[in-house]
Image: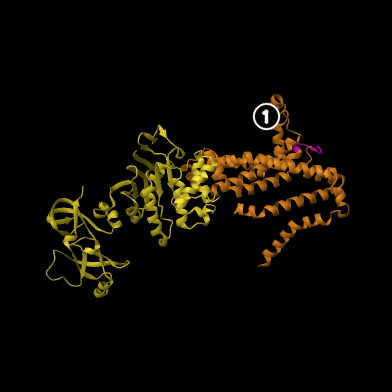
Chain colours: A orange, B yellow
Amino acid sequence: MPLILLLPALLGLAFLLVPLIGLVAKAPWSTLPSRLFSADVWDALRLSLVCATAAMVVCLLLGIPLAWLLARGSFPGRGVIRALVTVPLVLPPVVGGVALLLVLGRRGLVGQHLDAWFGITLPFTTAGVIVAEAFVAMPFLVISVEGALRAADPRYEEAAATLGAGRWLTFRRVTLPSIAPGVVAGAVLCWARALGEFGATITFAGNFPGRTTTMPLAVYLALETDPDVAVVLSLVLLIVSVVVLASLRERWISGLR
Amino acid sequence: MTLHADLRVTRGDFDLSLDLTVEPGEVVALLGPNGAGKTTALRAISGLLPLGDGRIALDEEVWDQPPRVFRTPERRPIGVVFQDYLLFDHLNCLENVAFGLRARGVDKQSARAEATRWLDTVGLSSYARSRPRSLSGGQAQRVALVRALATSPSLLLLDEPLAALDASTTLHVRAELGQHLQRFTGHTLLVTHDPLDAMVLADRLVIVENGRIVQEGRPTEIARRPRTDYVAQLVGLNLYRGTASGTTVTLTEGGTITLAEPATGPVHVAFPPTAVSLYPEAPSGSPRNTWPATVTGIEQHAHTVRVRLTATPTGPTTLLADITPAAVADLHLSPGQPLHATLKATEIHTYPSS
């Protein structure tokens, strides 16, 4: 192993791991239990988990059909649409939040009709958090599922058709099971992204404890008032991420292969 | 009920144009080299590929007639056994066989009972809960066969059903498949590039080259009277075209062959490689068909040696001879060696070539 590669490699490893170690080292262990079980932390964690899971479900419901359309459909401009789908991936989340506000805000293009016709207001509500999280997380699911669909052998779908299965039945009983690892991988990435979402959430949904203050928002908020609480919250997020990653590692890796 | 398929499909440079009929209970084999359009034909009949022109109909029931009628595969009464079987790996064998019944609206209980019966007919009921991945090639093929048969199709389509098997099991599986096809009362269309599969399994052969039918008939008829070089090679015969006048045939490629029985006009001349004998010197008594020849190739077969020769200008340009290994040793055969080839006129088969 040449030193010129080894040295930056170790430096990179340290760069990734030392902040996490620092988080654990600086945690106020003595007061940890009392802080951990405070109502604020609990509310933020519950809200984060609920919103991230709801956002993941939204992404699954809309993202799998979208991935199918991109992988199997043949229509003009498919390449352009695929590129557009990945825009939220590279877009600064704050910009996404602003865009959502302009469209779904109370005076937004779509939002004003939602408000006038159905009395639905999305910004600065828990539903708004879910919308913001789904917006930034969906591309992860679409890309993963589309990749799995492209890798799946379409001849199995043909075999199902010759056995009398229509398109929908074939999709449910043949296509979906065969891409399950890709869907799981996409869902995990999507959930993790939603859980950590900050910029779009605070822009579109604001910061109202119990309603829109998710863990990342609570961390940011606590950093200004009580840094110890920020450390505790961060630690909780770190543990949740590691647990999820560890429990799905096997499937995740097999899905990406 | 008769299946009529007038298939016309154009894909890029390739142009398929076949007119097929299959009677009930009949097994028809579509035989041809790779790229002849056999699989394209099968895909068109199963509805996986729409026709460009033509018509597919089972009696009065039209399946495809562009531009007006097109039935999707799930609305055709067919069963397909694919080349690599395409069993669903996330389902066990029983669920695979029950899939078609479930798709056609049979309730779960009845579908499973029916699927169990089908697995039983191929001796695989003990594998009902096994995943297809864990089966041997022959077992997987049988599951694929009963999966296709479970929906009681009018037409059974088989795409190279034995190609994915290793040589040691092919013999056994082929014989068994033959029995199942015999029992099936619907129409069967088999696609294969293996002449042995076609000869053993089919009642009638349809030979396809370059998207066209070049010959069709009963296996014995095709074996005795091949019409193209491909067919002659398939059945291991020497085949030539020529013009007969009395007992002499002037070959179009040059050289002459003398017949035992007189004939006239354009003819095909066919004879097996075993009818050719090789001698180091011109044999005495001068049999009628004796040509100086040169060895161009030697192939070892199971019990014989096939020698490729050229007998220009007096005889055929290419000539196959089957001789015993002992004769090879006697002759000290090597490529480029000059010899004398004789052909027994009584083993020559002559038939009009139009």
Name the residue: 86% across, 51% down: A33
Name the residue: 57% across, 47% down: A177
Residue A154 seen by the camera: no
Q: In the displayed structure, does residue A111 sit left or right of residue A145? A: right
Direction top: furthest residue: A116
Q: Which of the image's four quarters has the N terminus of chain A?
A: bottom right
Name the residue: 69% across, 53% down: A247
Name the residue: 56% across, 46% down: A149
Q: In the displayed structure, does residue B257 sit left or right of residue B320? A: left
Work out whether residue B298 or residue A86 is closer to the camera in this orientation and state it: B298
Work out whether residue B282 or residue B88 is closer to the camera in this orientation and state it: B88
The secondary structure making up most of the magenta span is loop
Residue B173 seen by the camera: yes
Residues in magenta, as a range: A203-210
Classify residue B173 by image quadrant.
bottom left
Q: Which of the image's four quarters has the C terminus of chain A?
A: bottom right
* Dot 1: element: loop
- Is B82 one of the magenta-colored residues? no
- Is A206 one of the magenta-colored residues? yes
Q: Give the amino acid type for the residue marked by disc 1 in the picture.
A: Val
Work out whether residue B138 or residue A196 is closer to the camera in this orientation and state it: B138
| Count of numbered labels shown in the rendering | 1
* Percent position of residue B321, x then y: 25, 65
Chain to which mark 1 belongs = A
Residue that carries the numbered disc 1 in the rendered image? A110
* Percent position of residue B344, x then y: 17, 63
Q: In the displayed structure, does residue B149 sit left or right of residue A192? A: left
Query: Callout 1: 10 Å neighbours few (<14), some, many (20+)?
Result: some
* Percent position of residue A226, x then y: 87, 46
